Each structure stands twice: as structure tokens, then as C-alpha cells.
Amino acid sequence: MARWAAAYTSQCEKAIANDPSLAGDGPSFCTCVATRYAAKFRAVQLPLMFVSKPLHDAGSAMTTECALIASIEDEYYRLRESLSAHNDLAATAYLAPDFVGTDVRGRDEDAKQMLYRMKSYRKDAAQITTVLSAREIGKRMAVGRKVLEVTKVTVGRKSQTLETLTFFSDTWIDSDGTWLLQRSRVDRIDTYVDGRLASKVTSTGQAR
């Protein structure tokens, strides 16, 4: 299945590159479909997807979710770019008027407070956002994502790699065809120092 996934991803990316109408999906869509198919199906099942309704329906559901993931991942990227540029006006274009963010200890903040806090982030930190799941319910989309932030810190004379992995549960709303982030809740924060787990804090506020 690993060989099939690699071949599918390559063919999918070529198809997207050659067809402008598919450009909105992007490489992340191809990787998502290949990864999920490889995890869900056995190689012998793939040819049967054209004749088996249960297999076809399962594959279609994965493809639909991957399309949502690719689309909303792009929204997160543009929001992050606006935040990195300290462009509050551009950033608020992705937030609902009643946006509420909730940190891992249950404290709420509005859009203005969130934008102010984001300005204090270290500029030298590398950050990667990965959407784990996306489910559309009417005019709402429930999204699960993780954000990996990597920085270098110096303790005494020793340089260490600090990795923070934050898991979120988000809600986006469809506002006249435009998706806006309405709720963002931190579920868990894992901290690693030089690859070793240093702490894990869940939304109950408990450290492990």
C-alpha cells in the first residue's frame, strides 16, 4: 500500500498541476487521500471500490473530507500569514464578529485579545499547522487541527530544541459563502525538549 500511496500522490499532483479547476485542492488533498486510503483499505480492496457500494461510499466520504481539509488548511495558512505580518485588518477578515478563543485552562479571549497575544510570539519560531479532521454540518464546519512550533532556547551554555504541539477544536461558520473562524479551543499542549516529552497539559488544566 505504501507504493500505491506514493504512486497515487504523484499522479494526483500531476492532475492538479494540469487542470486549473483542481488547483484549489492542492498537494495536501492528494496526500490526505493517499494516506487515508492506505490506512483504511487493503490493496485487494481498491479494484473493488468501483463495484462495491460500501467501499465506494467509504472512499467518497474520505475524498470529501480531504477536500474540506485542503480548503480549510489554506484558510489557516492565510490567517497565519496575516498574523505573522501583524496585519490585524487582514487577520480579522478570517474571524467571525463573535469570535471566542479558549485556552487550555478554560480562559476565553475575543479577537482583539487574541491578536494582541499573537504579536508576542517569537518571530524565529517555525510553525506548521496540520488539519486532522473536517466535518461540515449545515453552515458550520467542525475542524480538528494541531500546530507544531519549534524554537531554539539556551539554558546556561547549552542550546536545546523546544517543540510545542498544540491540539485545537475549531468551529467555522459559512457567512455568505465565506468561511469565518468562530470558535477555537485548545484541547491539549505537549511540550518536548530535545525530542523528549517534558509536559502534557489537557483542557482540564491538569499537567502530566
Image (cartoon, rainbow, N blue to C red):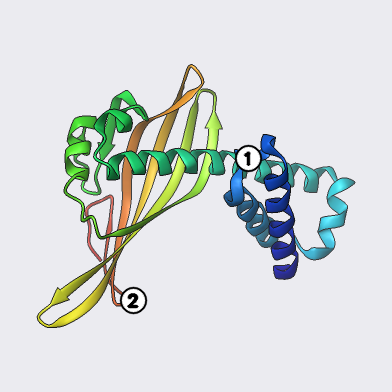
- Mark 1 neighbour class, 10 Å CA radius: few under 14, some 14 to 19, many 20 or more: few
Residue denoted by label 1: 23
Classify residue 102 as left or right of residue 134. left
Give the image quarter of residue 20: top right
Q: Which of marks 2 and 1 is in front?
A: 1
Classify residue 176 as left or right of residue 18. left
Compared to 173, does 71 lie above or below?
A: below
Residue denoted by label 2: 195
Q: Inspect the image, locate mark 2, and give the three-letter code of the amino acid beneath it.
A: Gly
Q: Inspect the image, locate mark 1, and give the three-letter code of the amino acid beneath it.
A: Ala
Asked if residue 110 can be seen in this view, the reply is no
State the residue in front, 125 or 175.
Answer: 125
Residue plotted at (67% across, 57% down): 34
Image quadrant occupied by the C terminus: bottom left
Residue plotted at (37% across, 47% down): 168
Classify residue 134 as left or right of residue 52. left
Give the image quarter of residue 128: bottom left
Label 1: state its secondary structure. Answer: loop
State the residue in front, 64 or 92.
Answer: 92
Residue plotted at (22% across, 58% down): 206
- Mark 2 neighbour class, 10 Å CA radius: few under 14, some 14 to 19, many 20 or more: few
